[in-house]
Amino acid sequence: MSRYTTHCSSLIGTLVAGLCLDGCATTIPTGRDGVEWTPLRGTVDKSLGEGVHVVSPFARIYKVDLREQER
């Protein structure tokens, strides 16, 4: 194989891996908590705290505001 063919196959592999991993991470901002729901397990017992989390691409993450407001 030539260097061009090797480079193209490497680039295609990287793009495919990137597309497969798209949507596999979520960020929970400060003052919020994340509740994960998946089609197979339903609502997951453990909540997601602040920060970046790796989740299933099929999961839905509901971000709940935990901050208290005063008038």
Image: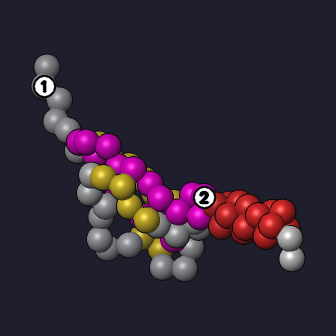
Report which residue position mark 2 lands on.
Answer: 22
Question: Which stretch appears magenta?
Answer: 20-38
Magenta residue check for 30: yes
Q: Residue at x 47, y 59 (%)?
A: 25
Q: Does dot 1 land on a helix, a strand or a loop?
A: loop
Where residue 16 appears, as percent x and y from the top left, is 72, 65
Residue 20 visible in rendering: no
Q: Which of these two is toward me, 27 or 32? A: 27
Q: Which of these two is toward me, 19 or 30? A: 19
Where residue 42 appears, as percent x and y from the top left, is 47, 74
Which amino acid, by three-letter code, is at mark 2?
Asp
Q: Is residue 50 above or below residue 12?
A: above
Report which residue position mark 1 lands on.
Answer: 70
User: From the image, which quarter does the N terminus lie in?
Assistant: bottom right
Which amino acid, by three-letter code, is at mark 1?
Glu
Q: Does dot 2 land on a helix, a strand or a loop?
A: loop
